[in-house]
Image (cartoon, helix red, strand yellow):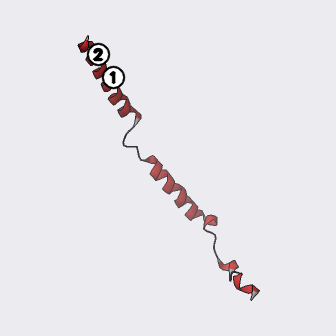
Amino acid sequence: MADQNVPQNVENEQDPGANTQMFRAFVNEGQTEAATEPKVNGRMLAIVGGAVLLIAIIAAIAVL
């Protein structure tokens, strides 16, 4: 009864971390996802921020 929790055929199981091809596929998969450019980048935020600042300055001058 005590032997029921012992896994059978432990020697026949393969370790996917030990497979070089699987490891390389895992690494390459992470690189392709990181290579995609975000939809909103810093340049776009700077342009929008500059436009908002310019409109605010023009509105402040028009009020005076």
Q: Is residue 13 above or below residue 39?
A: below
Residue wearing tag 2: 60
Q: Residue at (50%, 54%) from the top-left corner? A: 30
Q: Residue at (23%, 14%) from the top-left corner? A: 62
* Quarter containing the C terminus: top left
Residue wearing tag 1: 53
**Residue most toward the front?**
63
Q: Is residue 18 above or below residue 56?
A: below
* Residue 15, quarter of the rendered image: bottom right
The residue lying toward the viewer, choosing from 2 and 37, is 2
Q: Amino acid at mark 2?
A: Ala
**Residue most toward the top?**
64
Q: CA distance from mark 1 to mark 2?
A: 11 Å
The residue lying toward the viewer, choosing from 46 and 59, is 59
* Residue 20, quarter of the rendered image: bottom right
Q: Amino acid at mark 1?
A: Leu
